[in-house]
Amino acid sequence: MTPRARTNQLLYQAELLLQTPAGDDEHAEARRMAGEEGALALTELALESLLREVTEHAALERHDWRELLGPQGAGIAELHRLRELATREDSWLAWLLARLAALHESDGVARRRSGAAQGLIAVGSGAALAEELAWCLGEAKAEIAALRQTSEEW
């Protein structure tokens, strides 16, 4: 499978997980959270696959997003473009990188929705992780098309 096909496959699988109903039994909340974190993990794999894809011409040894998108990353135009995007707070990539960092922490990133039922006041945007990730994937796919075009020119 080519890096491009793998990137597409991982994005598709992440979207499928987000669309899978959690059900309405006693495990629904845990199933929803697992689906959200699973989709986010697939999106992380898709990001690394994308980085492999757009840097093929540079023959890099490693494709870890932390390295390539960090300040010491390779001086490749596509990576520079992504680094700039990551610094914009309202961008899909800034959102994604923050959630990926949380995913790797011990608390994870998915949250229970039952707090309001226990008399607690919910704080935050109110948007479910699944909704935000669906937005992120849509924005990412548009950016990926542009990155692929630039990469193919090389």
Image (cartoon, grey):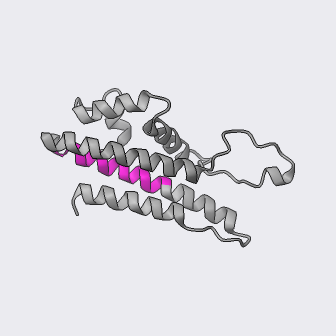
Residue at 34% across, 62% down: 9
Q: Residue 113 location in percent, x, y? A: 72, 53
Residue at 47% across, 46% down: 136
Position of the C terminus, as image quadrant, is top left
Q: Is residue 4 magenta?
A: no
Q: Is residue 145 above or below residue 91?
A: below
Please indicate whether residue 114 sits to the left or right of residue 62 in the image. right
Residue lying furthest left: 154
Position of the N terminus, as image quadrant, is bottom left
Residue at 54% across, 55% down: 37
Q: Which residues are magenta?
A: 40-56
Residue at 42% across, 44% down: 139
Q: Residue 123 location in percent, x, y? A: 73, 39
Overall secondary structure of the magenta stretch?
helix
Q: Nearer the viewer, residue 2 or 150?
A: 150
Q: Nearer the viewer, residue 119 or 107?
A: 119
Q: Is residue 60 visible?
A: no
Where, by quadrant of the figure, is residue 122 drawn?
A: top right
Q: Residue 63 location in percent, x, y? A: 29, 44
Q: Is residue 41 magenta?
A: yes
Please indicate whether residue 121 sits to the left or right of residue 39 in the image. right
Q: Residue 146 location in percent, x, y? A: 27, 42
Q: Is residue 138 visible?
A: yes
Please indicate whether residue 120 sits to the left or right of residue 131 in the image. right
Please indicate whether residue 6 sits to the left or right of residue 109 in the image. left
Q: Is residue 113 above or below residue 57?
A: below
Q: Nearer the viewer, residue 26 or 151?
A: 151
